[in-house]
Image (spheres, coloured by chain):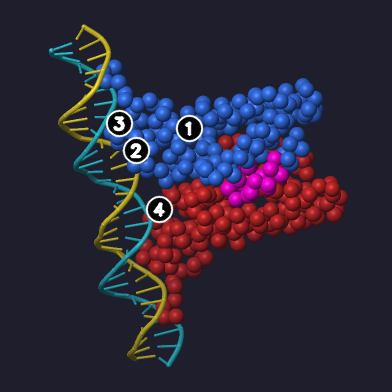
Chain colours: A red, B blue, C cyan, D yellow
Amino acid sequence: MARPKKFDPEHVVDAAMAAFWAKGYAATSAEDLVERTGLGRGSLYHAFTSKRALFQETLRRYDTHWTARRVEILEGPGSAPERIRALLMSVVEEETAERPAHRGCLAVNAAIELAGRDPDATDQVRRVFQRVEDALCAAIQRGQRDGEIAADRDARALAQFTLNSMYGLRVLGKTADRRTLTGIVDSVLRAL
Amino acid sequence: MARPKKFDPEHVVDAAMAAFWAKGYAATSAEDLVERTGLGRGSLYHAFTSKRALFQETLRRYDTHWTARRVEILEGPGSAPERIRALLMSVVEEETAERPAHRGCLAVNAAIELAGRDPDATDQVRRVFQRVEDALCAAIQRGQRDGEIAADRDARALAQFTLNSMYGLRVLGKTADRRTLTGIVDSVLRAL
DNA sequence: CTGGTTTTGTAATGAACAGTCAATTTGAGG
DNA sequence: CCTCAAATTGACTGTTCATTACAAAACCAG
């Protein structure tokens, strides 16, 4: 290695993520990325090849970094239903927060914007969804062992149902108020 | 009126809708719209002012035309749970269809792409969501009268829960297979 | 048939787009 | 303290973007 990079690639990807997250893929320009990352145009392209490749890197980092945070919520202390409620309520809080307004979940945004047109993005999104589903399934199985969730029900099916509800909140969160969303969370937990 | 329009405005909006629906707002170019609608650039801009205004018109038409179809499913013959299942399964069918691939629901797509950045689009999306929610609420109240759905539960809350699940399917539909989605529909109906 | 108003088609606008390049700087290895 | 591969810089590419200008064409009212 001759000359070391002046920047931390992870920081740069985080900055790019902020841009893509706020505006979506198509509406984010190379200029936006240059501004946010602080890199020069040349450096950015030298290091990441293209806008598309940088977005792919962004999705990868979202998977490892942000998805892990969601999983941690489920693995925290407390009963399984409590943990699941905490997860869903964290989504409600995010969606109703003033700032950043309605940025939602990057994986969901990418799924809606690019599914069917960008196979690589779709794959990465699938990975995110799968990780959360698996964590939900583990939490539900724990709840079944502890007698908080009916043991005769299929844990995988319940996990998928809960995941579905969580992503529903990402959609309704764009227009619904906190009360409504909280009511939905109550209904979901009642169904477990 | 001096010279009559050569085109049917509704047909043109439908064509524009197809373009926006397939690619999203930002990724659809004026050129795409010209191709799809068959109009000349001049005519298109003369009649619809701007890409943004045409999109707004598109959302309005989606609300009156497509949302009505969803509502019709709920008002069809059969028990309330049957009708709700039919609605959710129509979403599953659309999401797993080969063609058009993963175009989803235009209102959901617009919500995810533009919420927080385009107040007019957000308002229109809210209107769509509200109409479906109201129709669900009516169906659920009917089900409660007929004894198919527990009468002690809040119909509005159940409608919002069901709406949430429906839009969850729009998200998971991008990566999940038909079996999984159908399983989720089963879980949702079990919760009513 | 004619006047007046609107629609239409085409060409042109400047801005913004993603991506490239050659020149320059840098610092780790020898 | 060189050498040289890699990183940086910022100007530059050609393309595509949304939108407009303008003149020709079309049609209804009188």
The quadrant of the image that shows the C terminus of chain A is: top right
Distance from the alpha carbon under mark 2 to that under mark 1 = 18 Å
Which contiguous range is marked in magenta? B167-185
Which residue occupies the foreground of this view, A63 or A34?
A63
Compute the Cα span from label 2 to label 3: 9 Å
Residue A116 position in % (x across, y down): 52, 49
Q: The disc labelled 4 sits on which kind of residue?
A: Ser
- In the drawing, does residue A142 fall left or right of residue A50? right
Q: Is residue B113 left or right of residue A183?
A: left
Q: Amino acid at mark 1?
A: Leu
Distance of label 1 from label 3 (alpha carbons): 20 Å
Is residue B180 located in the magenta-colored stretch of the structure?
Answer: yes
Q: How far is the residue under mark 3 from the one under mark 4?
A: 29 Å
Q: Earlier in the sequence, mark 1 or mark 3?
A: 3
Q: Quadrant of residue C22?
A: bottom left
Judging depth in this view, the residue of A134 and A47 nearest the camera is A134
Q: Nearer the viewer, mark 3 or mark 4?
A: 3
Residue B154: quadrant of the picture: top right
Q: Position of residue A142 (x, y in %)?
A: 81, 55
The vertical placement of A15 against C13, above or below, is below
Q: Residue furthest front?
A: B98
